[in-house]
Image (spheres, coloured by chain):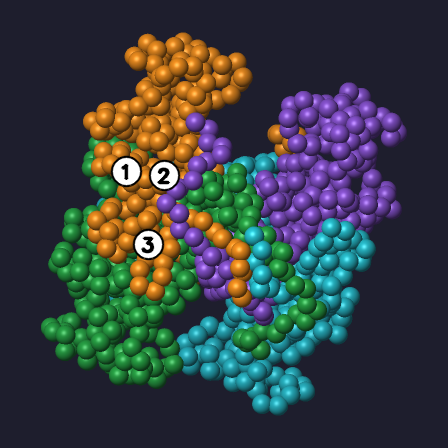
Chain colours: A green, B purple, C cyan, D orange
């Protein structure tokens, strides 16, 4: 097999008999023991090495998103491990597949929303909070008129205040990285009650999206960082499922309380 | 891009501007409307078209394995759909990933076990039940000595009798397809109590594995048919989850009954 | 563990010590050997048993969608099997995960598009081709004005005519099931050149979506049937990969033609 | 829904209205900005916080395993992203599903092999290299007699020397963490030529498994760390696929070089 003419360009990794190169560096000589794992993940996606300040904010985001207890994705991973304990990769993949629009998507939705508002704004980003408040007021008002949600507002459990939000803002401020997306997000927190008629907390997934966008990461891939963070949390759940399983009890709690009904139900949201 | 020298042989499908060929047939002219879906699935894996008798046994197996209520795989698929309703493929994949060694693997394990016993036997398959009983007795005795399970024996719910077993045996008999694997499986059912000291039912997953092996399907891929069958059942669960969801209630039943404990637990089966 | 108060309703499956019930039927006595696999899949999703005529159209759709050669999903499944041959479920799941918006999504997109046009139309469906042409002309014109694609038009390989389309229309006609969605789809085929300025073929994925919608299946789950069909095709690819592997050659064709470039590239469609 | 009597113990995460607790800590106050991401991943799986020395070795392992260019898993992820660009989680999951026995399994296999040899050894670990050489000689000899592979030996590309191996050994030595598993692995490297008749390099995946085992991580879950590392690499590939795609070219290189053959092939390793 020759395949003359084929050519697959990449800036990630290549290797030959004696060396492994990653991101243009010598993996063994330049990266192992010298670069942290979070730092490398940023570099792999962004195509540039983050500064130590950027790395601290980035890792704070990954830590914030790594786990949230018995989420649907954690339970799905544990049930999959129960069924197929020979395939750790399958249990991890099953858990990550829940990282879609509803439970893990807020981070990306929020980053994209804020980036869109800033991109639509003529001229440079505002110079002060008043300028951000004006931008936020316009954006929240338009979202309400379009009957669409403002991502990053509200949380089913943390109804008044999400403890992650002020801490991430403070870390970003310490590192000189409280940029336009975070400032606009704060402004959304200040102005939304006058449009929506009630005060909702700025949630942790949302502030993480804003922080990642301020780091210059591609807003269409922010979900990917939530998935990477969650991979660590899911490994924790799979390890605990090995040590002290709950999967069988979850399964039995559902199966033993199953009730057959002849009515197949009706869909609340069929298109036709 | 030319890729001279590359060559990827296949007996499955190719297409050009005017036609689509599948398994050497013209898909539109020869297969659509003329071949059933189960028949095609058999053909795709086995590389030969099944007879109508083979198709009836094969589809009976798929029907037998399609669903078993709120199994861990069905619950995992529903939880994944809850989290990521935009990705039906993700919910289906998450459910299938539970098709491993424990809950869906018995079909393949049983077929492989029976095939191994028959392959190790010198000469042609036995001519009568006595011959099969002798083979089965030897195999069960060896399995017990090696402290390994005899696949296809016992069921957590159907403790006395799995209703699928006699029906599939009867269908195979009607179609002239009760071959060596099924006959050996029946013999295991007759002789195991004298070795194990108690009578266990021949389960449905096991009899399906025996039937698939008698159809000449590759025993190392029998799990694949269980997965295909389960794909239909999982689609049923996903469709029902849209019409009348239970995923959120399952999640809350787990999350609200979570109890934090500082003890990380210990593994019952670490290798070191 | 008791779990009083929990209740999970379902119309799919339940079982007790002596019986397995599926869709309100006795699985062993009423379904095995009496119901085909395609028929059961329809029943599981729709919550009602299809007629023999409906089953024939439905299975023709599944056969049409089962495989299309070395698609990206088939290649992904084979590469995953190469890497993890111990996990058939992982290879199958990896293949199905490609069943998203681009390669397998047309079936659902087309069914939803046609259902939306019919739902927006006041009064009963048109009585003749002229009526459907008027509906189609309006819909295609609006889609063009909104710069959105009309799903089901065009194919990268079958540039003039997709051989599946006329055959499925004929099968539906034979079975008395060429309903409003199929008739509207045909009308789209007749009228679109006068709006788009060129004639594109009605593709096979699109006609399958129209046929499934005419069968009364939920348009938001049509992708699920494409996935079920493709599961059979992927099993065929995995079985062939065992017998005559190409995965390693594909991998080497890519890896050996990798070219490192320091330029990380730029995204054509970043939101910010 | 009440669910009295249900109780699901966990040492990972819980949350209430005002706080989120992870691993018994306050997530916002004690972890964000204070714990690195690699450190947290270790803690989640092991149930104890690693020391800075352990963290450095652990992150060096994750960096070593994050990527190896256009591997089958990276190509599968890119093909899945090509087919379903709306589902980043699906592309990531598809890539991880290749993390099975063959390409990513060596890390776990090697750790488990070494742990098994040490566990079977009476008394404390050897005090010097001679003692490890004796242990290794016995283990390699037994493996050869049983015709099983010694995991961690040899590499398809790095035929003489894997550059990751000496670097990781040195980092472990620097941090005082070159423990029994790494020392036994080195001994395998010294003694195997006299048993196998040729000298093979100690590969990078193997040394990573030995290092993880020396960190006290559960040897049955070492594959999980390889998967976590690879998740970062796969995100890099998905990000690059967005910026400068190769998936379509890979697909076309396969599809255009497909050659239909009527011979379905034969399996080299069917059980029956």
Q: Residue A164 location in percent, x, y? A: 27, 60
Seen at 62% across and 90% down, the residue is: C123
Q: Considering the image in quadrants, where does the C terminus of chain D appear? A: top right
Callout 1: helix, strand or loop?
A: loop
| D140 on left or right of D44 | right
Subunit of label 1 = D
Specify whether residue D226 is in view.
yes
Q: How crowded is mark 3: few (under 14 residues within 10 Å), some or many (20 or more)?
A: many
For the residues bearing labels 2 and 1, Cβ distance under 8 angstroms: yes
Callout 3: helix, strand or loop?
A: strand
Nearer the observer: mark 2 or 3; the answer is 3
Q: Which mark is residue A56?
A: none
Instruction: Please determine whether, in this image, residue C145 is positioned above or below residue A77.
Output: below
* Quadrant of the rendered image containing residue C189: bottom right
Q: Residue A250 location in percent, x, y? A: 54, 53
Seen at 33% across and 21% down, the residue is: D180
Q: Name the residue tied to disc 2.
A: D46
C-alpha gap between disc 3 and disc 1:
19 Å
Labels 2 and 3 share a subunit:
yes
Seen at 60% across and 41% down, the residue is: B102
C-alpha gap between disc 2 and disc 3:
17 Å
Q: How crowded is mark 1: few (under 14 residues within 10 Å), some or many (20 or more)?
A: some
Subunit of label 2 = D
Instruction: Please determine whether, in this image, residue D91 is positioned above or below residue B120.
Output: below
C-alpha gap between disc 2 and disc 1:
9 Å
Q: Name the residue tied to disc 1.
A: D50
Seen at 43% across and 52% down, the residue is: B259
Q: Residue A161 location in percent, x, y? A: 28, 68
């Amino acid at each position: 097999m020759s395949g003359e003419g084929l050519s697959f360009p990449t800036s990630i990794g290549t290797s030959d008999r004696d060396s492994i190169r990653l991101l243009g560096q010598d993996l063994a000589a330049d990266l192992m023991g010298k670069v942290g794992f979070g730092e490398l993940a940023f570099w792999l996606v962004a195509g540039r090495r983050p500064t130590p300040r950027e790395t601290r904010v980035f890792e704070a985001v990954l830590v914030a998103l790594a786990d949230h207890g018995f989420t649907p994705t954690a339970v799905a991973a544990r049930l999959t491990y129960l069924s197929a304990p020979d395939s750790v990769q399958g249990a991890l993949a099953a858990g990550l597949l829940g990282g879609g629009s509803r439970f893990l998507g807020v981070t990306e939705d929020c980053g994209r929303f804020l980036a869109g508002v800033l991109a639509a704004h003529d001229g440079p980003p505002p110079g002060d909070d008043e300028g951000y408040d004006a931008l936020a007021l316009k954006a929240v008002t338009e979202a309400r008129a379009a009957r669409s949600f403002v991502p990053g507002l509200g949380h089913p459990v943390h109804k008044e205040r999400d403890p992650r939000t002020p801490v991430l803002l403070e870390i970003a401020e310490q590192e000189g990285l409280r940029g336009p997306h975070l400032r606009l997000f704060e402004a959304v927190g200040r102005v939304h009650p006058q449009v929506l008629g009630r005060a909702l907390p700025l949630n942790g997934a949302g502030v993480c999206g804003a922080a990642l966008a301020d780091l210059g990461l591609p807003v269409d891939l922010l979900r990917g960082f939530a998935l990477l963070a969650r991979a660590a949390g899911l490994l924790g759940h799979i390890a605990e499922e090995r040590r002290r399983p709950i999967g069988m009890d979850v399964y039995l709690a559902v199966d033993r309380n199953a009730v057959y009904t002849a009515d197949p139900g009706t869909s609340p949201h069929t298109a036709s």
